[in-house]
Image (cartoon, rainbow, N blue to C red):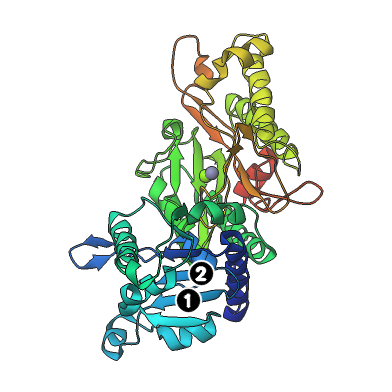
Amino acid sequence: MPPFDPIPLPELARTARARRERLAARIGDGVAVLATAPERTRNRDTHYPYRFDSYFYYLTAFPEPEAVVVVVGGASPRHVLFCRARDPERELWDGYRHGPEAARERFGFDEAWPMSELDARMPGLIADRPALYCAIGEDPGWSARVSGWLNEVRAMARTGVAAPATLGEVRVLVDAMRVVKDEQELSIMRRAAAISCDAHRRAMRATRPGRHEFEVEAELLHAFRAAGAQAPAYTSIVAGGANACVLHYVDNASKLAAGELLLVDAGCELDGYASDITRTFPVDGRFSGPQRALYECVLEAQLRAIDAVRPGASWQAPHDAAVAALCAGFVELGLCEGPVERVLESGDYRRFYMHRTGHWLGLDVHDAGDYKRDGQWVALEPGNVTTVEPGCYVRPGDGVPEAFWNIGIRIEDDVVVTATGNEVITADAPKRIDDIEAWMRERS
Ligand code: MG
Ligand code: ZN
């Protein structure tokens, strides 16, 4: 798959500015401040690949470490960025930096200053403001810094200025925005999804008995990176046979055997946005009878759950649809003792299906946004993106038909809530049995 052209910076910057304006409208005369993520050491003097903070990036599109955004609300709003100063010596070693002057212009800020001026300027920005919104409790160093600014303003009380009386959590305000994606976000997420679909097709073609899970993982990583995705959105799960019954299996070290299924849960991150796909397919390219029966049951549950994704429906509706279908299937296959209503009510199905059916998806793989409000499941609205991922995990045990032992199946798609229903943006990764077997027959 050829790399996509990225969205031009001026467009990203315009959208980010519009988001800051929406945030400003929500904080009244208050001030919001957010830092991006720090660089993190992996060992001695090497770092993990840098990843910005999702909230910070959402409001700025600014990708560099060591940066802080300040949004001043009220009658004369101001958008302020603090970032690393230009430094020819450091840039020779570590690469290009925008620097405050260029950053201000390119990223649509009213003011930009070097990070070294943050502590000197913040007291002035928050003085006489009724409320300060920041990330509370996340990082002790950051909390101490915010306290320092507040104390400095308080120390000036006799000059007639007042410190904010209210401290608020800025991320809660941004969560409510992030959970509804705009067109720009959806277009990036469709591209991320397309790359991940391609990766799953490639993984299916690369799978055969005698290969290792990590060899299949390598195919996924190749497909992500070759198409321009920066990284996997989360650690890929490549789980053959019984390993698929370990929900967060990430060793990916076992050898694959004929007659087993392979569960692959993997998705790329492209330009900050996650995709999240699971496919389960036979190592030798042909489903056995029991595998086929259980797979059809999970697929039916997934299709019904996707059907339940539409505007106005409860967040819980897809989960309920999936569980109902799974229970019917479990009774039919002898995994649970009927009637179906009893299995539903008693929760017996949880022996084989113990997780929930989806999560919000966006900048984070488990994205921002409430699931319940005032004790009620939220209603789905256009622009929401959720995964739909029922599964079935059968460990050997008393009363469990042996034919199903060690079969683990999950089928996961990324679904956008539209004005009239939904759009499955990961449909290009085969999931019907016929389509999977046909695709795998073409292996070299
Ligand atoms: Mg997943
Ligand atoms: Zn997921």
**Left or right, 420 with reference to 126:** right
Quadrant holding the N terminus: bottom right
Asked if residue 54 is positioned above or below residue 432 in the image, the reply reads below
Question: In the rendered structure, which amino acid carries the disc numbered 2?
Answer: Val
Extreme residue in the bottom direction: 88
Tell me where residue 44 sits by quadrant: bottom left
**Left or right, 301 with reference to 175:** right
Residue at 29%, 66% (x, y): give it: 155
Q: Can residue 223 be seen?
A: no
Q: Measured from the top left, where is residue 16 in percent x and y?
A: 58, 70
112 and 398: which is toward the camera: 112
> Which label sits on residue 427?
none
Q: Which residue is mark 1?
A: 80
Q: Can residue 400 be seen?
A: yes
Cβ at disc 1 under 8 Å from ligand 2: no
Q: Measured from the top left, where is residue 4 in percent x and y?
A: 60, 72
Q: Are marks 2 and 1 in contact (CB under 8 Å)?
A: yes
> Which label sits on residue 71?
2
Question: In the rendered structure, which amino acid carries the disc numbered 1?
Answer: Val
Q: Measured from the top left, where is residue 181 in percent x and y?
A: 65, 58
Quadrant holding the C terminus: bottom right
Residue at 49%, 54% (x, y): give it: 171
Residue at 33%, 64% (x, y): give it: 154
